[in-house]
Image (tube, rainbow, N blue to C red):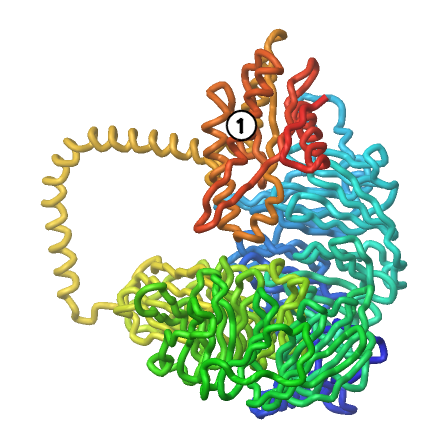
Amino acid sequence: MQSQKKPDYFRFSFKLKIAFWNWTGLPSKIGSVLAAILIGFFGLCTTPAPAQTVRFFNGQNGLADISRNIFAQNSDGFFYIGNKTGLYVSSGGEFTRIDKPDGSPFKDTAAIAGGSDGSVLVAADKELWLRTRGGFEKIPFQFDGRISLAAYGMDFIVLSGEGPARNGGIWRLYRHQGANPVFVPLVKDHADSQVPSRSPLKTEALSVMASEEKTVWVGCGAALCRYRDGGVDTFDERQGVPHEIWRALVISPDGSLIARSDGKLVIIAANGGVHVEDIPYGLPEYFRQRPSEIFMLRMTDGSLLTPGHGSLVLRSSAGRWDDMDWPPGYSPQVISSAFIDREYGIWLDSPGRGPVRIAGFPFWKIFLSSNDISPVHVSGIRHDAAGNFWIAAANGLFEYAASPSGHDGDHLLKHLELENISFLIRTGDGALWTAEKGKGLIRIDPVSGQVRTLPSPEPVTGALALDSGGRIWVGTVAGLVRIDDPLRYVSHLPTVFALQNRRINALCFDQFGRLLVLTDSVLFQQTAEENVFDPRVDLESFDIGDGRAMAVAMSNDVWVLGTKGSVRKIFLPEDGSPVASILDDGPKNSDSTTIFRDSRGWIWLGGSHGLDVSTPNGWSHFDLTSGLTSSRILPGSINEDDDGSLWFGTENGLNHLREPGSLPVLPDLHTDFLSARLDNIDLLGRQRFWPEGDRKLSLQFIAPTFTGNREIKYQYQLVGVDPEVRYSSINFINYNNIKGEKIIFQVQAQDLLNYRAASSAVLSVRSSGLKVSGFKGSWWVVFSLLAVALLSIILYRRIKLLRQKNFEAAVRGRTRMMEEMQTQLLHQSRIDSLTGLLNRRSILDELDELVASLSPNELIATALIDIDHFKTINDTLGHQGGDYVLEQYGQRLRQSAGSTAICGRYGGEELIVVFMSVSSTEELLTQITKVHECLREPMIYGMSEVVATCSVGLAVILPGDTASKLIGRADRALYRGKKRGRNCIVVAD
């Protein structure tokens, strides 16, 4: 690796610098063609492939225009870029310009928003266009000046200019099935009121907006306004929000808002708490001149990316600000716009340089030493007691100084020129031990700097293990060696004491502390006599080659990796024969070269196709497209640091994964049709009529993705033609000699590499009529038609009587069925499907009615219940585990709340209980305490016991309380309970 001028430790990998289109006098199109040819040639060479963590799109005409590119993505995964030259779309590859129905481009694109149903709203040429599966449709709407668009469920929010107070407006674009889209003001005056609305959304200048589900946040004047359920809440200086013009808004998954102005950052929690801090970086000149274009992105780990200093700055979830580290060779001065796609790639635009996509940020980092020499083929990583960072590599042992910023590669303290060393362990005295393959062990004292070599009577293989008693087990080419007291000085390794004349390739301990020893052909297990090993598994019968590495799962299954790249999962019963199985749901490529189990119990497999990891939530895959510097993982190069972070050695460098548990799961794919033609008839259009006769059916389909799109497979079937489901790796198919007036074709994508499913796409069309081209002597057709008509008359008379008898019964049955359906639909519209409780709207309606009908002597109470540390539950058990906890909470709440209480899901992990009849505060506290104790009882999920506690905020209605005020008091009590440490009940004042 090359040293860098700036001693940055973590940088993104970027080695491919294509400048063909910049050659003097060479047209851009020719340069692009030559670039593609040379890239393809390099891809066929045996040299290591350059990293593609950063992907450039500046070689495409129109995208490198000096104007600002803006980004959007719809729910199907299609990615859109708009600028002054036009509108462009990609399904994961190159971008294609799309035009208006009349063939003219979407010039001067001002805003784009992707909808939840695959739709896209585009503001261009001072016009508004809606794209659905049926194509583009112009919306009757004119704007002049700035415009902002945001998805709002199935609808859209449109902010024109600075809102109604400045000759603009803020509307909701309603889209009802089968009806034309309709614009409705977001805030309307009451029909029975003579006084105009004083909502700040109508009286203040609006600067920016953001929406999430059914909530819209707007910068209104010097305040922040939240529109939800038809009402508007204002957050200004009275709530602690500074008097600023807000430029960028982000809504977090927990419902909190993050907003920035030119120099301030404010966070408004879902419960109304406000946090304010100064942004320690000034704005680049570009945004000082264009403040309305300031943006902010929230990463899935909670960090924020926003303009600052010379380009971009990053605020960690812990609140620490720092400059963004850029890929080597790419340090733009200005980033004018940014976007996060559904697969967590970051899109950045620099005027005149075009858009780029960065994968893996901020999770995957790359170690770049600031010194002339860097570790190569890393096999071990450890921190010493002083915090210094040690790396065992093929070209020696490296010590780097501890860095308060966490950049462990800033300063090289020591390089020991050792050859062919592997593994790195730390004993109780703080000493580091590594194996020098073919020779012996090396002991390093980090405090004194003393390095001592312990030669071995037999060459060591590099297999090391440290047991709970502090003893070191060493594998050699002729058996097993053990150092009983590593703290005592020894001049050489002891002789082989077990498994003589067997090459020891790997050592690890099972869940019961017994040592497992892997040789070329046999897996041994330690017996009750610790110096005796029982041969448990003969590897030759498993077709995996010689045993090379292994890992023990939390279930105590042993995963064995052989020289053929295959992995076998072996169960070792206490009595009986071992049971071996293949990884049915694991990697499809048998090319693994390394296997590792981390402290979480996750098992990692590395090979020439990247990384695969088995977690409680299933399998995940990582390679170049997801942030690694190379898809080729080196043998024995996966390591875990003391802080739980993971290191991966690749042929192009060392990758670091700081928080494996926070890695987002890739979303499922959506299969879509790109085109469907029957001869020259567009089956996706609105005109669907085709004449009789043999026809050619041509179909093209896609599953949009920027992660591993070359590995997508398709399964499809044309009903009536294909006798069974067919499979293909290409995304188009042609059928000849298609007859009939109906076509039904179903296709589904499969991402086998990333273990993702996809929704199906179904084409079901029927011709609007069959055209008869002429008889020309075919009088039998006329005769057949007359015969059919006569037969129809006879059948009609007989059927008429039968229909008359059954009509009344059918009407009664249909009426009864409709009543049952209406009852079921009413139930579904009121009940939350996961918890079985009333949904938010229904419980609030019930509470409104109770408050309105309450007599002066009656009391009611409301309790808000929040599951403690629910994000941790999701991270630990997965989203299915989190759903299970919510489902259990719903059942327990219904059972414990009593018959005089109604229960609902308030939102997310928050539940609500309304006590309809309260006789005394003491009785109410007794009742809510029983509910609290019931909810926090342990529950069993899978094989694990889960304890999910909760915090409760309780409020009894006071004179003058509305339903909203009552809930607000309970919410504030809940907030105080969280501040006190959670798992408690707090009564409102």
Q: Position of residue 772 (x, y in %)?
A: 27, 65
Q: Quadrant of residue 349?
A: bottom right
Disc 1 marks which residue?
A: 931
- Residue 284 versus residue 171: which sits nearer the camera? 284
Please determine whether, in this image, residue 390 is positioned above or below residue 873.
below
- Residue 865 versus residue 502: which sits nearer the camera? 502
Please determine whether, in this image, residue 906 is positioned above or below residue 757.
above
Asked whether residue 733 is in view, the answer is no
- Residue 890 versus residue 710: which sits nearer the camera? 890
The structure residue drawn at horizontal position 64% and vertical position 83%, both measured from the top left corner, is 441
Asked whether residue 498 is in view, the answer is yes
Secondary structure category for the residue under label 1: helix
Left or right, 262 with reference to 658: right
Q: Amino acid at mark 1?
A: Val
Left or right, 857 with reference to 819: right
The structure residue drawn at horizontal position 58% and vertical position 87%, both measured from the top left corner, is 43
- Mark 1 surroundings within 10 Å by alpha-carbon count, few (fewer than 14), some (14 through 19), many (20 or more): some
The structure residue drawn at horizontal position 50% and vertical position 40%, both measured from the top left corner, is 938
Q: Position of residue 504 (x, y in %)?
A: 49, 82
Q: Position of residue 815 (x, y in %)?
A: 29, 29
- Residue 637 versus residue 230: which sits nearer the camera? 637
Left or right, 574 with reference to 456: left
Q: Position of residue 214 (x, y in %)?
A: 62, 41
Residue at the far top: name it: 857
